[in-house]
Image (spheres, rainbow, N blue to C red):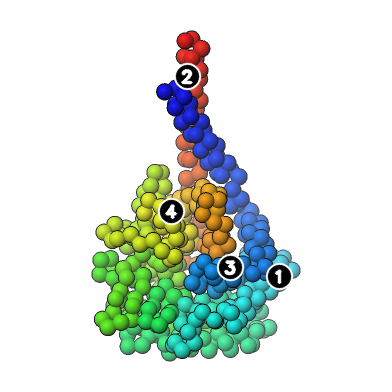
Amino acid sequence: MKSIITICLLLMLLLLTYSTAILFCSPYLNSSDHEIDYYSKELNSLKKEMHLGIAKKMQKIYPEGYIFTNVLYGLSAIELVRKIEDPIGKKVWQTEARWAISEIGSDYGTSIFDNNLNPAYGTFYHSWKTWLTGKYLSILDKNNIDTVLYENFQKDCNAILKYYLVENNPYPETYKGISWPGDAIVGIAAMKLSDKEFHTDYSKFIEKWITAVKLNLTTSAPLIPHSIKQTVPKSIEPSRSASQSLILRFLYDIDHDFALEQHKIFKDKFVDSFLFFSLIKESEPSRRQVEDIDSGPIIFGFGSVASIVGIGTSKLFRDKALFSDLNLVVEFSKIPAKYFIADNAIVDLFLLWSRISEPLITQTIGSRIKDFANIKYIFLMITILYTAIMLVALRLMWVRRIG
């Protein structure tokens, strides 16, 4: 019996030691005053992998792995350009973002998509390509703009105008016969970006698109669906947090009031407590749990993709408690996940993009999140547990010595 207790105590001490090491050694959790150094280090590490062809390896794992890898890398590089002052560093990461755009436009980049869809290559490819291009153009000197890319960007925005709202359907196809609303919303955000940066006027179309979205919410919870099979009759997959986290991230920039309404419903339906943390469930409690490539591994009902993307979403919505909890849990699980599951570049890129990205327009709903609300409480809890375990250990040693 004493041996079992001793083993349990040792395991608890190991867990506490690991948790303490993460809390005080994590380059991100301790980077509130040095976050640019953290972002630069992460991107420089990923840069090596990108130029060694990691995106093609990700394509073997995920249906859109090649595009996502390049898009997230390019977007993260663009956000870093916005944060640093060094002109040489800015030039380096501008060049990397431009390289990512060229990779997306390559023959390999388009090879898995259908050129016969409207828009060409489908909504996923078209939306993310347009968003990345627009974000890249936004960091260039307007007097020295890349005219070819600018013309392509406006052409792609006009294709959204033409194809993203046909017969009151706001979700054109990504693949033949199926749509993911999370793909379409990225394209609409690109139009919003065009209005902000280049003084175009897509506002009336965006309003019509949002109206159509509101008419096509799910019935169980008035949220945007996860996917839609464009059959007769349509088959609608209810909301899931893997896509909702991403949808809310872009809806924030498109229609802020509607985004706040959707975010409240999302939190009511999907955010739940586990141990001492608030985390994101993949499915509504009343729905059958679905684990697939979109959700990533689901652990105790909580979605890994939703949690990683949710970091960026909670950051934008100034949800400090959820932002803090998600970051802590991700940091605690990062090392074992890489060891037992996979050292996955696209996961690292999603995490970096979630943390580094900022909204198009700063909304006045609270101050910027800079720290992690629960670190001090977890440290206190660890200290108490350490003390309790050591007292128990000393007690056992004393009893054994007397005996």
Inspect this view and state whether residue 75 appears.
Answer: no
Separation of marks 1 and 3 at Cα, in angstroms: 25 Å
Q: Which mark is residue 396?
A: 2
Q: Which residue is mark 1?
A: 92
State the residue at coordinates (68%, 83%). Answer: 144
Which residue type carries mark 2? Leu
Q: Nearer the viewer, mark 2 or mark 3?
A: 3
Of tags 1 and 3, which is closer to the observer? Answer: 3
**Which residue was labeled with disc 3?**
57
Seen at 66% across and 60% down, the residue is 45
Q: Residue at x 62, y 77 (%)?
A: 103
Residue flagged by tag 3: what amino acid is it?
Answer: Lys
Q: N-terminal of the two: label 4 or label 1? A: 1
Q: Is residue 89 left or right of residue 241?
A: right
What is the three-letter code of the residue carrying label 4? Leu
> Which residue is the site of mark 4?
322
